[in-house]
Amino acid sequence: MTTSVAVVGASGALGSSTCSLLDAADEFAVIARLGSRSDLREMLAAEIVIDMTLPAVSQRVVEYAVENGKKVLVGTSGWTGERIGALRRIVAARPEAGVVIIPNFSLGSVVATALETVAARFFDAVEIIETHGARKLDSPSGTAVRTAELLLRSRAERGPVHAPHTDQRARGQQVASVPVHSLRLPGVLARQEVIFGGIGESVTIRHDTSSSASYERGILLALEAARTATGVIVGLDSLLDLRAEFDAALRMERAADDSSSRDLPSGQIAATTPSP
């Protein structure tokens, strides 16, 4: 069954690539492509509205779609906790309403953030450096904000991160107690580094986006979820059971260790590849 879609912000980079992606998909049909001068009523014939606009107009677009009974997928950054809280109150009054907000459609970015939430439990010092193209208007990025919030949540038993001298402007902006540094440079699409510091060591987890093609799987996954969404869902991680994936990988590793150790002589802790 094909689901009809309206893309608001269709002339922008992400909106345009989303339209091209859906034009090649059998399960979705783009029936309306709205630009900055379009009447929002043009979206009303669609079942799902995709917001790929700008932070300054995104809230108005999303609220209009919700008030008119549409499922909504939000790919625009700049959705703060305050904005999301206000949207939750609007959606709560409409049991059939559903909004999926995705700060980053890259599956690699989501996996990196999941790894970062694990590391945050072992290191008290952490900072984020996010880099985007010079045309990106908002900072910090939605991905960096989401990452910082998840890092703090994963540290519920340890408390806020250790971040000295944050009264100095050069120390970045604190988000959920995590210092975030934003770079805007030509020649870069998207990059995020999360750096953890401990006594005598540091760990860096970095994700680079070199092409918008990396967003395609995430867009389709989020659209599939938007079809039946209720309430407000935030983050691609909410649609992926990454914890179960990590647990399964750990079980496989332990099983492999147990299997190989049975074949080792006493005292030998690692198998070696025999010489030819």
Image: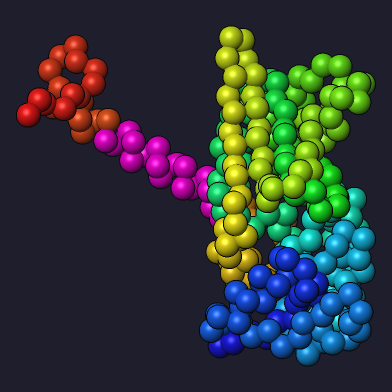
- In the rendered image, is residue 232 in sight? no
- In the rendered image, is residue 220 in sight? yes
Q: Nearer the viewer, residue 114 or 195?
A: 195
Q: Main secondary structure of the magenta part?
A: helix
Instruction: Find residue 195 and report its horizontal and vertical position in percent.
Output: 65, 27
Residue 150 lies in what quarter of the image? Answer: top right
Colouring chosen for the image of the structure: rainbow
| Residue plotted at (79% across, 43% down) | 184
Q: Is residue 77 magenta?
A: no
Instruction: Find residue 170 and report its horizontal and vertical position in percent.
Output: 87, 25
Residue 203 lies in what quarter of the image? Answer: top right
| Residue plotted at (61% across, 10% down) | 199
| Residue plotted at (61% across, 50% down) | 209
133, above or below 40, in the image: above
Instruction: Find residue 258 and report its horizontal and vertical position in percent.
Output: 25, 30
Q: Which segment is the magenta one?
A: 239-256
Which quadrant does the N terminus fall into?
bottom right
Left or right: 242 in relation to 175: left
259, above or below 24, in the image: above
Left or right: 251 in relation to 16: left
